[in-house]
Amino acid sequence: MPINRYHISIAIGICLTTIGAVIFFSPAAIPFSPLGSGPTQVANQPVNNYIILGFVPYWNLKKLSPIAMESITNIAYFNLHLDKNGDIYTMVNRREEDPSYTNYKRILNHVIDLGDKPLTITFMPIDQEALISLLSSPTNRSAAITNIVNTLTESHASGVNIDFEPLGDIPPSLRDAFTSFMQELHTELAQQDTIKLTTISIYPSAVSKPRIWDLAALAPLANDFVVMTYDYTMPITDNAGPNAPLRGSNQLFDNDVIKNIAEITNLVPPGKILLGIPFYGYEWRTVDDTKYSPTLGRGTVASLERIQAMLDDQTLKLLWDHNTLTPYGIASVSGQTSQIYFENEASIGLKLEFVKASHLGGIAIWALGYEGEDPSLWNSITTALSSRP
């Protein structure tokens, strides 16, 4: 019987009280699991080791580190765009090539070496108009599938990641169209012996706000779902807040990682879920240094590499948010206060314990190149996910 929200709720009730007594400021060791032990038998649970899928965006290719390549099990190139007709988007204008396509060609021509890890290619529409047009037309869907398969063949990729991120409310007809698209793609990929991994990226709120994801219908059509469990607090916000809160919903926030994964496991087997792990946070100028302070403008991305540099030169004071089990930092320059909410070895360690306790399929990292050169984070990840219990 799959783990569902009921089982996870029981585990949370037993174990979260223990965490409160253990975690203080950014702990030196990984605290106890937020879930504790899960069932020993899980339907559809993979028998192999955990997947560690590392996304490398086209703008970070030069920042891939040897230890990152050694630590991941699969690498995903992000990304190739699809236009409204289902064609690969190659040109921004008559003279300028799309940079994601340019770097894809560099990979194809071995100018950039992604090593020997199984390669996944991410495909996503160039914009919202393209998403709607592509899905709404059987002809455009067919063209997109042909182009996806041809690209996978020429790149010798063994995996495909479908990342269609809709904006706003989506009519049921478009949800049905996305399911049809994935059914058609699944049928075509079944004829390709080389394609071993099909993943679909989804928002963590995909159950409470389904958008284009009919998870129950999509579950048989993908090996795994990449749950993008980050961006819980967006750059445009009235108050600073956590990027990936493990807990805290129904008290401080509408959602958190545990709540959202519990919802998703009602529709998708846990073994098909890859938990999103962010190697970045957000920084805001804030009114003062109180936690969740009002912001003074739009937040900006802060990579773990930059955050570590600020910690090293002591321009950032490291604190621990007991509410969400995540770190945050406060900096003050020329009388102006800034707050950064991010992940570190301790908070990621808790999420890895959650992955194991919930019998999830593994993790998906966004994004390679943001972590810097410190090997300790990778050592923690590979040690925690070296094998299944």
Image (tube, grey):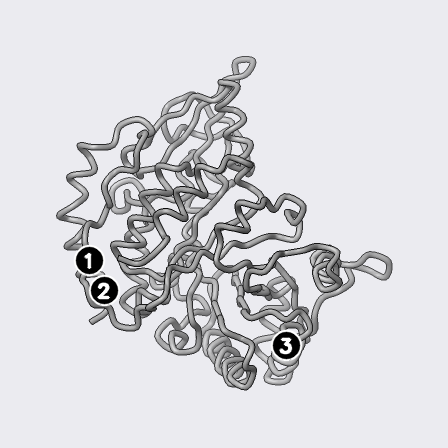
The three-letter amino acid code for the residue at tag 1 is Gly
Say whether disc 2 or disc 1 marks the residue closer to the N-terminus.
2
- Compared across the picture, whether 284 is left or right of 56 comes to left
- Label 1: element kind: loop
Disc ID at residue 165: none
In this view, the residue in front, 302 or 295, is 302
- Choose mark 2 or mark 1, whichever is in front: 1
Q: Do the CB atoms of the residues marked 2 and 1 lie less than 8 Å apart?
A: yes
Could you give the CA–CA distance between mark 2 and mark 1, rounded to whole angstroms?
8 Å
Q: Residue at x 34, y 48 (%)?
A: 384
- Compared across the picture, whether 59 is left or right of 356 comes to right
Q: Residue at x 59, y 60 (%)?
A: 116
Q: x and y percent of residue 377 in the render? A: 44, 39
Q: Residue furthest top?
A: 334
Circle 3 residues within 10 Å: few <14, some 14–19, many ≥20: many
Residue at image mark 3? 144
Disc ID at residue 3: 2
Say whether disc 1 or disc 3 marks the residue closer to the N-terminus.
1
- Compared across the picture, whether 210 is left or right of 236 comes to left
